[in-house]
């Protein structure tokens, strides 16, 4: 008798959707931040905003790949999903860039 190791419709899909939602929210924050900081930071705000959007979209793509690997591992492998290290690191970098842009805005606005 062949036992099913996991339910195909639950955890991997919810995890993928949460990664997508987080990456898209950070990308939107980067784009909005670039627009808000444009008056005080100038072209630097657009560079930082585009970098945040690029990193967030990279995390979006990495999450899709991690989802495919996790489902393949759950179906054909040991039944344990791999750790999503790359998307976590990419989104942490994007959040750090947004934080630095906000700090720059506060410092420049204070002068």
Image: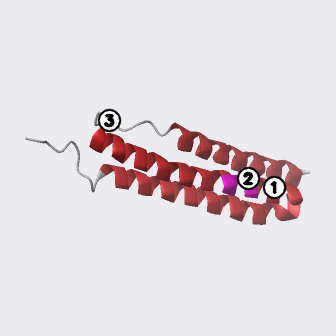
Residue 87: quarter of image: top right
| Rendering coords of residue 50 (x, y %) | 74, 58
Compared across the picture, whether 67 is left or right of 104 comes to: left
Looking at the picture, tell me which residue is in the foreground, 104 or 90.
90
Which residue range is magenta in the image? 50-54
Q: Earlier in the sequence, mark 1 or mark 3?
A: 1
Q: Which residue is mark 1?
A: 47
CA separation, marks 2 and 1?
A: 6 Å
Compared across the picture, whether 106 is left or right of 30 comes to: right
Asked whether residue 62 is drawn in magenta, I would say no
Q: Which residue is mark 2?
A: 51
- The label on residue 80 is 3
Looking at the picture, tell me which residue is in the foreground, 88 or 5.
5
Circle 2/circle 1 CB separation < 8 Å:
yes
Chosen colour scheme: secondary structure
Look at discs 3 and 2 and give the one toward the viewer: 3
CA separation, marks 3 and 2?
A: 33 Å
Q: Earlier in the sequence, mark 3 or mark 2?
A: 2
Please determine whether, in this image, residue 72 is positioned above or below residue 14: above
- The label on residue 22 is none
Please determine whether, in this image, residue 43 is positioned above or below residue 15: below
Circle 3/circle 2 CB separation < 8 Å:
no
| Rendering coords of residue 46 (x, y %) | 81, 60
| Rendering coords of residue 34 (x, y %) | 76, 61
- Crowd tier of the residue under label 3, counting other residues whose Cα lies within 10 Å: few below 14, some 14–19, many 20 or above: few
Q: Residue at x 41, y 36 (%)?
A: 82
Q: Residue at x 13, y 42 (%)?
A: 3
Please determine whether, in this image, residue 22 is positioned above or below residue 83: below
Asked whether residue 51 is drawn in magenta, I would say yes
CA separation, marks 1 and 3?
A: 39 Å
Q: Secondary structure at mark 1?
A: helix
């Amino acid at each position: 008798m062949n036992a099913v190791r996991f339910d195909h419709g639950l955890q991997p899909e919810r995890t993928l959707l949460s990664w997508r939602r987080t990456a898209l929210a950070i990308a939107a924050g980067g784009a909005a931040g670039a627009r808000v900081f444009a008056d005080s930071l100038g072209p630097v705000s657009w560079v930082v905003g585009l970098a945040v959007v690029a990193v967030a979209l990279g995390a979006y793509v990495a999450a899709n790949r991690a989802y495919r690997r996790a489902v393949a591992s759950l179906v054909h492998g040991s039944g344990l999903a791999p750790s999503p290290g790359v998307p976590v690191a990419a989104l942490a970098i994007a959040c750090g860039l947004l934080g630095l842009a906000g700090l720059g805005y506060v410092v420049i606005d204070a002068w």
